[in-house]
Image (tube, rainbow, N blue to C red):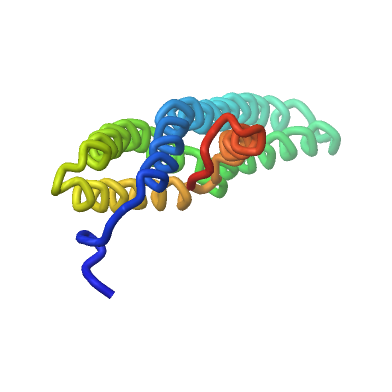
Amino acid sequence: MGNPATQPVSELRVLECIDSAEFWSTEIGPYAEDMRKRADFYAISSVVLSTITGLGVWSTLAGSTHWPAVLLVSLVALASAAVAAIPQIKGYGRCAEAAASLGPRYGHVLGELEDALAMLRNGHPDGSARASQALKEFEEVRTAKQNLRPFPVGPQEKLNDLRAKGTKRRGP
């Protein structure tokens, strides 16, 4: 088997990657924003619950020895801790940052793929090498997207639906 950079690349493969890059270049940004909003929601909720707990614990302890009041403050404190832990456990903030960087990367690789396709169609002698390099870059970006946690299930399902309806070529 020869050097992958010098092996012929089909136009169909490049077109499949172009479809995928076009889709993800527009869909990954809203996904990143959704992850950021989730992380922010939990952070704000945690601060609010912590504030309520902080204010409530002293008045409850000073003014009441009844167990329901103490239990209520304890439950709010527990809820505050849980709400603070959720975005860390789920990785919403890290995912938002990683996903946000993928939009421009997909845009760049889309341009590389389109240039490679033009070279292939024009019979340029370096077309196959250019296409191989563009495919390599595409796979690197795709791998980064595949490693997002939580994975962008909604956009992936949308892409799968488009493919099933035949409005997108088959591709990664």
Q: Is residue 31 left or right of residue 15?
A: right
Specify the farthest residue to the bottom. 1
Q: Which of the 4 quarters of the picture holds residue 42?
A: top right
Left/right placement of residue 41 relative to residue 107 reads right
Is residue 112 found left or right of 54 in the rendered image?
left
Badge count: 0
Camera-side residue of 54 and 130: 130
Where does residue 24 sit, x and y in percent of width and height?
45, 34
User: The N terminus appears in which quarter of the rendering?
Assistant: bottom left
Residue 37 in the image: x percent, y percent? 52, 26
Q: Which residue is painted at 51% across and 39% down in the image?
A: 92
The answer to whether one can see residue 41 in this image is yes
The picture places residue 117, in percent across and down from the top left corner, at 29, 38
Q: Nearer the viewer, residue 27 or 135?
A: 135
Instruction: Pick out the residue farthest to the front.
Output: 123
Compare residues 86 and 55 and report the one nearer the observer.
86
Picture quadrant where residue 19 is located: top left
Tell me the residue at 44%/42% (across/down): 16
From the top left corner, tell me how far across and down residue 159 is, in percent: 57, 35
- Comparing 161 with 121, the one in front is 121
- Name which quarter of the figure residue 97 lies in: top left
Is residue 108 something one can see in this rendering?
no
Residue at image coords 47%, 50% = 146
